[in-house]
Amino acid sequence: MLSPYDWNEAIRQRAEYIEERLAEGSPVVALSCREGILLATVRGTQRKLFEIYDRLAFAALGQQADIEALRLNAIDFAHAEGFARSPDDVTIGRVVAALSPAVKKAFGDPLAAPLVARSLFAEVGATPETDHFYALGYDGEFRAFRRLAVIAGSPTAEEQMRACLAEALGSGEIPSLREGRRHALRAWAAGWAARRSRGQKAEPAGEQDLDAVLGEALREGEVEMALLDRSTHRQCRFRVLREEETESERE
């Protein structure tokens, strides 16, 4: 049986291990636009942005098997909730609250494998003011956000991304989809540039630096963007943006 000291030491080592694995993960940005919620990242071969239910989307960075496990659990819960209650009762808050205990249990059990993943969830509303965002950590803790949310390989990288978006959206106006695409890619580049600054204060990158970071990343990866459409009459509001819809933002 583990003593309290041994348990705390085991938890600390698990956290360090997971943070090390997440450090090189590609950031994800989600923000409210007039047309809906935009999700954006740069990926390699595997998709990172997914629909989990009507109006709900999911993205994550980390080990692919753990990301897939979280995605499937989120889908299963959402559909079971919609069947038992009604589709209108399926909210992103309920989904995250249902996933959180299992994630926390896996992290806190020294005999179980923890989930190496940091996740982002979004729910589009009738107006930008009613959009909802959540970030779920590998320890099961989650936070709610308004207007935007980001996940990255380190807290420092996330701070840089939020600072970049705060500067771009400082007026308080809700951006158009075109403006949102540009802001999202700049924020992604800010997070990617700061990904190795774990526990250290990083200086914000300039405009030219962000362009260089993004250009270098796109030599090996590609932009992936999706929209939770606010105004569509289709039941499925999630759609992956076509390459031509993102190409101009990379010029």
Image (cartoon, helix red, strand yellow):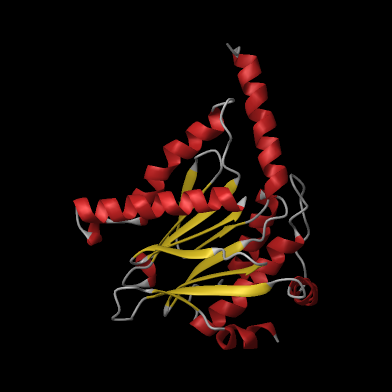
Tell me how many marks there are.
0
Answer left or right for 74 relative to 198. left
**Above or below, 36 relative to 80:** below
Q: Position of residue 210 (x, y in %)?
A: 75, 72
Query: At 62% across and 70% down in the image, what residue appears?
Result: 167
Along the line of sight, which residue is nearer the eye, 69 or 105? 69
Query: At 79% across and 77% down in the image, what residue appears?
Result: 208
Q: Position of residue 66 (x, y in %)?
A: 55, 48
Q: Position of residue 137 (x, y in %)?
A: 54, 45
Residue 171 visible in rendering: no
Query: At 45% across and 37% down in the image, what residue appears?
Result: 102
Q: Where, by quadrant of the figure, is residue 194 drawn?
A: bottom right
**Above or below, 243 relative to 169:** below
Query: At 30% across and 55% down in the image, what residue appears?
Result: 79
Residue 120 visible in rendering: yes
Q: Where, by quadrant of the figure, is residue 209 drawn?
A: bottom right
Q: Position of residue 217 (x, y in %)?
A: 75, 70
Answer left or right for 128 relative to 250. left
Which quadrant is the C terminus positioned in? Answer: bottom right
Which quadrant is the N terminus positioned in? Answer: top right
**Above or below, 240 relative to 139:** below
